[in-house]
Image (tube, rainbow, N blue to C red):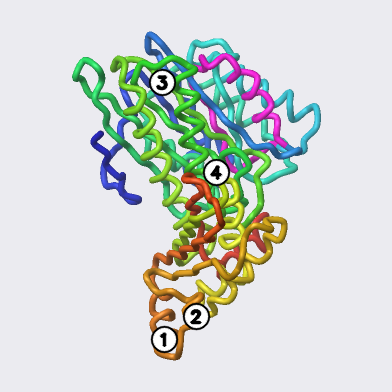
Amino acid sequence: MNATRTDTSPSGPIPLPAGFRAHAGAAGLREHGDDVFVVVADGPSVASSAVFTRSLFAGPSVVLSRENAAGGRARGVVVVAKNANVATGDQGMADAREVLERAAGAVGVAPEELLIASTGVIGRRYPMSILRTHLDGLAGAEFDADALALAAAMMTTDTHPKTASVEMTTTSGATARVVGIAKGVGMVEPDMATMIAVVFTDAAVEPGVLDTAFRGAVDDTFNCLSVDTDTSTSDTAIAVASGVAGPVDEGELRRALEAVCLDLTLQLARDGEGATKLLTVEVTGARDRDQAKRVAKAILNSPLVKTAVHGADPNWGRVAMAIGKCHDDTDIDPERVRIVFGDLETYPAFPGEAELERLTEIMRAEEVTISVDLGVEGGAADGSCTVYGCDLSREYISINADYTT
């Protein structure tokens, strides 16, 4: 597989894979810039997969999309930014259904062939008058938007659009592509996927195969991301295949999806609200992957760990504290645990003054990695997990204290 990471500030267009047409436009939900996009696949063998938030307050967009995604044959997606349309009652559901129907009519597909995603402030209804005007005008609009335009159109507090792309070789020797976009740098603690991510490919694949590969990629990437421990009401991750390029090896497809999703995950973590550092936590030697992930998330999500990383404070004991919170995991023996920052062991090595100074330098870097070996007796071969997040800064508080004002 030939994987190419898309720069976070690309200078040129990033075309979607073959078989897709897309439009991004400004309906007027935000003061400047595009805020709505519609993408549809016209390929011969369309397949799709989607995962959604498990929040009890899931919005109408999630509810409708779950229904339409069930058959694995969704052709595209409409995304509305700056308004989550959550906790808006029966009228909110009716509004979301109308947006879906008008978007589907504009691109010539049935409403049940499209998914819908929304992002923004919770508790406010869609401004339907401007959305109706915008969507009804799409019939004569150009559908030539690239991935960068789509990613920019769905940003909220993101500081830049996020895209990633990978090339694959089909079974006939042709080239197929996977292109992904994502947004979401706050209210990020996945309980399925997280934020909004849409992945497009021109590979030909059966829905069941795509679903298995995509869910596996999501579990190892978006599901291992956290910014602030808060699960969104609108989290949506979608994959759509147009089938134009032809079939690819299942393993090749899985690796490509994982590469794109991981790239997007790291971009989201680096751009976490107020973030100044990428924080990676690797846990090994666990009883199983679930235990490894539970401990890794306890470390990653600790405000004390995150603030220590932000200030480059060599207070490595906060990691021990976070591990200790997992008190139900009684097979974790502190005497068998090993904690490492970068390549510097802090426990059970008990660093002296010179080592603490070196630890401070390690924590001043833009990327900080904390590794923990739990040393659980009889641990499984797959007893490991890596999770991704960021530090916690004063700017995070400022952003969220003034979010709606």
Look at mark 1 in the image and give the residue it sits on: 357
Label located before the other in sequence (4 or 3): 4
At label 2, counting other C-alpha atoms closer than 10 Å, the crowd grade (few under 14, some 14-19, many 20 or more) is many
Residue type, mark 2 in image: Pro
Marks 2 and 1, Cα distance to the nearest angstrom? 8 Å
Q: Residue at x 40, y 37 (%)?
A: 258
Q: As drawn, which residue projects farthest toward the left?
A: 173
Q: Which of pointers 4 and 3 indicates the residue nearer the eye?
A: 4
* Separation (CA) of disc 4 from disc 3: 22 Å
Q: Nearer the viewer, mark 2 or mark 3?
A: 2
* Res 110 → quadrant: top right
| Vertical relation: 386 (above or below) 140 | below
Q: Which residue is mark 2?
A: 314
Q: Residues within 10 Å of mark 4 (few under 14, many from 20)?
A: many
Which element carries disc 4, helix, strand or loop?
helix
Q: Which mark is residue 223?
A: 4
Residue at (36, 16) in percent of width and height: 204
Q: Secondary structure at mark 2?
A: loop
- Magenta segment range? 58-85
Residue 405 in view (yes/no): no
Using a 10 Å C-alpha cutoff, classify the residue at mark 3 as few (fewer than 14 neighbours), some (14 to 19) or many (20 or more).
many
Q: Is residue 344 magenta?
A: no
Label 2 close to label 1 by CB (< 8 Å): yes
Amino acid carrying mark 4 in the image? Asn
